[in-house]
Image (cartoon, rainbow, N blue to C red):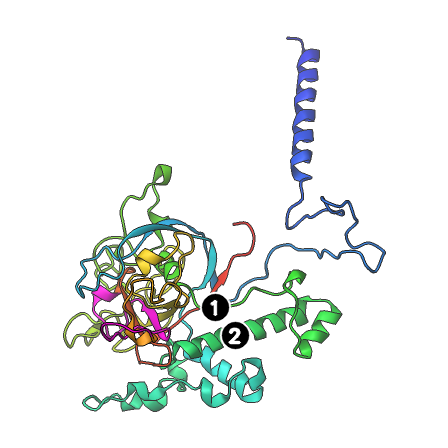
Amino acid sequence: MSKRNLLYLATVLLTAFLVTSCAKSSKPDANNPGGYSTITGMEYNGKDDNSFSVRDYSGMPEVPNMKYIEGGRFVLGSYEEDLMKSRDNIERTVSVASFWMDETEIANVHWLEYLHYVSSDSSVSGVSYEEALPDTTVWAEQLAFNDQYVDHYLRYPGFRFHPVVGVTWTQAQNFCVWRTTVVNKNLAINDGTDEEAEAAENGESIPLESGVVLPAFRLPTEAEWDYASQALIGLQDIDENYSERRIYPWSGHSVRNPYGEQMGDMMANFKRGRGDYAGIGGKLNDAAMVTTWVYDNPPNDFGLFNMGGNVSEWVEDIYRPLSYADMDDLNPVRKNDYLDGPNQGYNYQSYGYVRQYDSFISNSIRVYKGGSWKDVAYWMAAGTRRFLDQDSATATIGFRCAMINPGEN
């Protein structure tokens, strides 16, 4: 083939590539919606005051303290031996959509910041200062000298970045509402239009359509928490296969680090056995008798710290023994008493129906996940689950927030 023909062929191929590329790139998307509606032909942001406004959008704003969790399919449930004989979390395959999750537990300093703003303006969260206070008496024990934590754990600077405890599920929900309000107010003032900044200063909400503000902070669902804890992306082999399953948030079947200079160290802050909370002085293996720094211990493959150990964490779900059979297989959650009616065959006596026997089940019983500094390794397995009344608090339960991922991955 002559040079002239080769040049002609190259020109044709390049032209075809450019035309194809331009055609593909000309399709509207969230970041480039185009100047006109694809269904009416009407101009966006036209000179007419009544024209439909479509703001510039280059992606959601940065989410403070959060990591992106790419969703997917996984096996939800407990595949550890059911030591409690509860049979309430049988394995099943589900899918979870992509979302965002705090890389750390909410720390004391974060809660003190919350208390500061609530004390100056309770309307921001809708609760009073007294309602927002954690129950520090959860540390008090009749037969143990933990009294020093009652006054010092929340407020002393040395504990600033230890996880907040003594908070109820309800208080955690109120914190999520406050965080959404203050984060979005700050974004609107700094990145919004003059009108949006003024509206934010006056306490008005900024529409989600603006693209300036973030979706609401919330508690993760149980399924999201399990998925994020396992972080199976680090085990993915070819053709959607996993090389192994994870019991804990890290690889292997041991609670000790198998690599490098930290070989043999515990991978989490937990109770090793009866009376053994941290190891021997001079070589404290997990370095914490009670809680520890929220960035302590290696993160999992999603970049999340302490998904096993340190403190257990509240999730959104109400507790039902048969949740595994009830929930959808896409973004499963148990939000309320749906399916609990008298004709559904479930004997949840305490929920107000005529039953054959009493039950602790109610809509105020919430699931919490993960092991704490006071738990043995069994409870650090992602599939284990426990429950507590939403208005109760302990020295072993904290929380972290989650958020929807809007749009494409």
- Circle 1 packing at 10 Å, graded few (<14), some (14-19), many (20+), is many
* Residue 371 percent coordinates (x, y): 27, 68
Q: Earlier in the sequence, mark 2 or mark 1?
A: 2
In the image, 353 versus 400, the foreground residue is 353
Residue range highlighted in magenta: 353-379
Quadrant of res 214:
bottom right
Q: Secondary structure at mark 1?
A: loop
Q: What's the magenta bit mostly, secondary-structure-wise?
A: loop
In the image: residue 152, left or right of residue 36: left
Q: Residue furthest top?
A: 1
Q: Is residue 65 above or below residue 158?
A: above
- Residue at the spot of label 2: 177
**Dot 2: few (<14), some (14–19), or many (≥20) neighbours within 10 Å?**
some
Residue 303, horizontal then vertical, whole percent: 40, 59
Residue 129 pos. (x, y %): 49, 88
The structure residue drawn at horizontal position 26% and vertical position 87%, both measured from the top left corner, is 146
The number of discs equals 2
Q: Which residue is mark 1?
A: 218
Asked where in the image residue 351 lies, by quadrant, the reply is: bottom left
In the image, 85: left or right of 250? left
Give amino acid for label 2: Val
